[in-house]
Image (cartoon, rainbow, N blue to C red):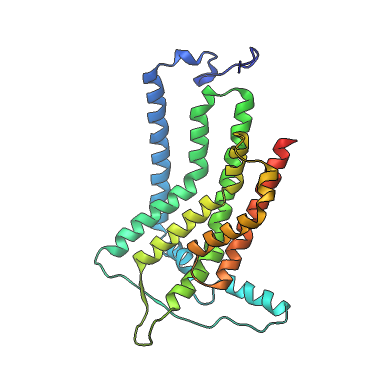
Amino acid sequence: MKRKPSQKRTGPDNNPDPNLLTFGGHLEVLRRMLFRIIAVVMVLAIAIFCFKDKTFELLLAPSQWDFVTYRYIEKFLHLLGSDYVFKEYHINLIATELSSQFMTHISTALYLALLGASPYILVELFRFITPALYENEKKYSVQVAVVVYVLFIIGVLMSYFVLFPISFRFLGTYQVSGMVTPNITLKSYISTFTTLTLVMGLVFQLPVIAFFLGKLNVVNASMLAQYRKYAFLVIMVVAAIITPPDLMTLVLVTIPLYLLYEVSILVLRRMEK
């Protein structure tokens, strides 16, 4: 497919000829970009590291029996006429190694810094590839980047407020015998938290994946609509895998994932118009 003569790519400093930048020049631009990203992430990580109390107050909040999610679920059930109340529970978080708390503090600060710097990282990556794009491609890539980031953040919030607290309540209070006292290590807590957060952030990219598959003519709206029933079963299986064996958690995860599937159908229909 030929490019239109009126479309011009611009190199660094709005240079109309991208060939003026040599391979070494591209590497230098890449090196500077990586340096800026690393610098921003490190500054954020140090700031987060210094605010230890607030950071871990936020991270450990979902482990509390009176977490905000439970209160809203209770209010919702009360509106439906139910008097259900979540039982109070207390789980000890422990550190079994001498350096585990310090190392967890460092790794957590880096993880949160990467999450906080993600908008800046997207901007830097976009600036790096912009010289190779035409004007219509720039607009297209900006829209995709914004959608990807928004969906990722929604997935992160879904994990923080719904999936992780309910998973922690179920798994942390589950006992095979009254003789076994649950004591969860801080390392296990943070590892599960980050894993579920990342998984939900990626799972919420379903409409974006459907969009690109539609562009490649792999799927279309009618195909996805035709296999709704099978998709619902697959989504339930996926939700069962990434959640504890608890009916409420399964429902709370299945519903938004299926809604994303329906959004994917709408996205493909809009593309086909």
Tell which of 54 and 190 is nearer to you.
190
Residue 68 makes an appearance in the image: no
Q: Is residue 134 above or below residue 253?
A: above
Q: Is residue 137 left or right of residue 103?
A: right
Tell which of 38 and 26 is nearer to you.
26
Q: Residue at x 63, y 73 (%)?
A: 73
Give coordinates of residue 231: x percent, y percent.
Answer: 61, 55
Give coordinates of residue 71: x percent, y percent.
Answer: 61, 75
Residue that extends furthest to the bottom in the rendered view of this protein = 178
Quadrant location of the N terminus?
top right
Residue 161 makes an appearance in the image: yes
Give coordinates of residue 96: x percent, y percent.
Answer: 27, 70
Q: Is residue 234 above or below residue 92?
A: above
Q: Is residue 269 left or right of residue 1?
A: right
Q: Is residue 190 above or below residue 16?
A: below
Give coordinates of residue 99: x percent, y percent.
Answer: 26, 63
